[in-house]
Image (tube, rainbow, N blue to C red):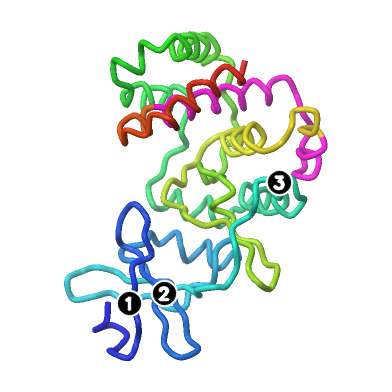
Amino acid sequence: MEHILGQEWEIVPAGGATGEAFFASHEDQRLFLKRNSSPFLAVLSAEGIVPKLVWTKRLENGDVITAQQWLSGRELKPLEMTQERVANLLRKIHLSEPLLGMLSRLGKEPLQPGTLFKMVMDQLDEDVLNFPEVKKTISFLKKEEGNVFSEVKVVCHGDVNHNNWLLAENNQLYLIDWDGAMIADPAIDLGLLLYWYIPEENWEKWLAMYGIKVTSNLKLRMKWYVALQTLSSIQWHKSKERFQEMNKWVHFLNSIY
């Protein structure tokens, strides 16, 4: 990275799963660099959903480096996920035609419940499949698969954990880490956020801020996708030998019902 910016820049890895992200600083200039980001980043930046994209450079080897504003700020706290600004930003994302158009041009097809179910089932190993809570969940998913179809398909983030919400020092809220973006039922994002952060007695109020009413169909779709995502989380933590976290998500399955 030094040969792109110059030797006077200090560049350090930003962590993350891919090892392709870096922080760069020089005097009062600060950038967040990433190798081979999706072109989707430019639209996210233009829509004000992620920090501003400053420049893009293509290297001789074909790699593309993007530089974004590196903003001072903090991630949201779990209790802050109840706030109206969170609902407003998620609604803006789900209603964005530019985001939907770009993901479509990048070859993303709308994901149906059956496709997502198969993707998760293909991940699960024999040990996970034998957990009684997992067996019960799979029975529920199979039974209700035909009842959770929705014609509404939007750009979903896929991991609306509070760690991915950045509140900048100027009070601007962003949703970052879009590697798992998909075109799918908005109930995927809504369900994860509500089940993780919002007491059920407050769902109606939060969804009113987002702009929709609670229906039995929406509740079923949210429950279905949260159960499916939880199976994936159980397998992921098991594969990393994080057994305490794995057990937490196994017990979480019981709370869904």
**Distance from Cα at disc 3 to Cα at disc 2:** 31 Å
Q: Amino acid under label 1?
A: Lys
Q: Residue at x 35, y 86 (%)?
A: 9
Q: Name the one closer to the observer, 112 or 36.
A: 36
Q: To which residue does mark 1 refer?
A: 57
Please determine whether, in this image, residue 201 is positioned above or below residue 96.
above
Rate crowding at label 1 as few (under 14), some (14 to 19) or many (20 or more) other CA atoms within 10 Å: some
The answer to whether marks 1 and 2 mark residues whose Cβ atoms lie closer than 8 Å is yes
Give the alpha-carbon distance from disc 1 to disc 2, as whole Å.
9 Å
At label 2, counting other C-alpha atoms closer than 10 Å, the crowd grade (few under 14, some 14-19, many 20 or more) is many
Work out whether mark 1 precedes mark 3 in sequence or the reverse, and give the earlier one: 1
Of badges 1 and 3, nearer the viewer stands 3
Residue 205 screen position, x and y as percent: 82, 37
Q: Quadrant of residue 198?
A: top right
Give the residue at x 34% y 29%. Answer: 238
Residue occupying image coordinates x 61% and y 20% = 255
Q: CA gap, disc 1 to disc 3? A: 39 Å
Which region is colored magenta?
A: 205-234
Mark 2 lies on residue: 67
Left or right for 121, reference 75: left
* Residue type at numbered disc 3: Leu
The residue to which callout 3 is attached is: 79
The number of callouts visible is 3
- Looking at the picture, does residue 30 appear above or below residue 130? below
Q: Are marks 1 and 3 in contact (CB under 8 Å)?
A: no
* Element under disc 2: strand
Q: Residue at x 36, y 21 (%)?
A: 121
Circle 2: residue type: Ala
51 vs 84, left or right, is left
